[in-house]
Image (cartoon, rainbow, N blue to C red):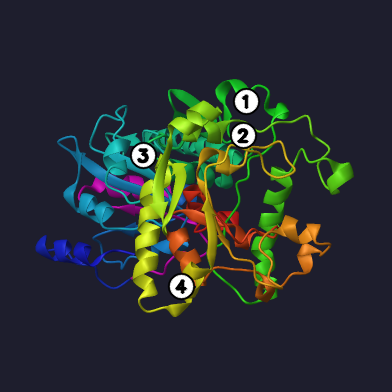
Amino acid sequence: MIRHKYFIILCILGLALASCTEKQPEETDSVVLYYSEKAETRRVAKLLAEKTGSALFDIVGKQALPDLQVYRYYFIGASIIDNDIALPMQTFLANTDFFDGIVIPFWTGADSNADYSELFENLIYRPRVIRAAGGFTEVSFFNMKTVGERMDTLLAAVAAEIDVLRSAGERAEAVMKAFAAAYPDRLGEAVLRDGDWTVEMDGERYYYAQGKLLSETEVKQAADFHSQSIYRYVTEFSDDAAENNTWKAAAMELFWRRNIFTDKASRGYGRSNSGAVRSNFYEKLLQCETRAEAFAHQRTITFFGSAVTVHERIVAPLARVEQRINELEKEDGEITVWKKSLDSIGAWNWRNVAGSSNRSFHSYGVAIDLLMKTQPGKETYWLWTQQKGINFRTVTEENKQNPPRSVVRIFEDEGFIWGGKWAVYDTMHFEYHPELIYLSFNSLLS
């Protein structure tokens, strides 16, 4: 919650948090936190708590601060002095974790028409700030009616923005923020625009668009596109069949999306909306819209003794993977056995997914196959298993040709997902998707 540094600074300022003297309000998901150097701030904070049914705490008062993790909305108030937030509130904000909640700042002692939200926003850690210009001036016992009317206007603006956030969807927010974090050199910050979460790339804005990742022009024809393969990749291993089914269900959805154009007659699966296409968001992101463009971004490296051509983006991650695996090998003989069993290593290959008209990520050079020598009774790839006349769904983990779990974890640490965790398994396959690794830590997508 509040970091140790905060208490040190408070001691220096001669301020201390005392024991709680009032009962904490129950069953509320919002709290008003304020600094009451001036009576006007306290008056506004109390009125705001009454109107919203929020818990109320003076950060340097006689109440001990509650467990902030129980709240979703945080109203933060302080006086503005010389165009800046009062120092105790600055200290509090810089050393407090609001747990990805929503912060709504308000202030007193300044022009009510000015917006000081950015001052608050620059000091807080992680959460989103609703910038509804919550300024209050000339606050006294005699004009609380006017203050209340302005507060009603503020709360209406806050409610409207929260409604937009909810309609856009928390999943959309999580996905677009994951992309922005994973590709900071290609994408701008994830922001809410036109009721949807968006990122900017090469001067053009892309919308979540129900998982389709469409440009502003494409959004107008959204029905012509199907969803991208965006899902929660689970990094944990489990020997429990029921737990494995959790991520296998997501993986099966990925399977259907990737094989959307497969011929039903010959393969036995497919979708009815075969007229839809996938947007070229990933192609633009990786700068691989054509074979020539993709080739221009490929680099040939040596990986475990083999010359491999890969996208320039994964050269450094693969170097770290190799270094870490070699270090771990010194104390793990299983890795030596695995390395000696490698038959071939392949990456860039301009082609479609088997049985599909969708481009394979091998086409962009961000997928790499580490194929082991054939072992009797061991299966590597679901399609090869099917071609043997074996139902690939019946193959147990023990009968799959898997790399050591420690190897998989190292790849995942560097932004790669492993095909062995797909229900339509591909145990030789690693694919660079740092955005999915980011999402694996976001419970909203579970």
Residue beneath label 3, please?
Answer: 144
Up-down relation of residue 280 to residue 88 (above or below): above
Q: Nearer the viewer, residue 344 or 38?
A: 344
Mark 2 residue element: loop
Find the distance from the CA under tag 3 to the CA under tag 2.
Answer: 44 Å
Other-residue count near label 1 (Cα within 10 Å), few / some / many at <14 / 14–19 / ≥20? some
Contact between labelled residues 1 and 4, with CB atoms less than 8 Å apart: no
Contact between labelled residues 4 and 2, with CB atoms less than 8 Å apart: no
| Mark 3: amino acid | Met
Residue beneath label 1, please?
Answer: 219
Residue beneath label 4, please?
Answer: 335
Q: Sequence-wise, which precedes: disc 1 or disc 2?
A: 2
Q: Sequence-wise, which precedes: disc 4 or disc 1?
A: 1
Could you say where residue 198 lies in the image, as x and y percent from the top left? 50, 33
| Mark 4: amino acid | Ile
Q: Kindly identify which numbered label has been placed on residue 242.
A: none
Mark 1 residue element: helix
Q: Nearer the viewer, residue 419 or 442?
A: 419
Residue beneath label 2, please?
Answer: 209
Horizontal side of residue 280 vs 438, given as left or right: right
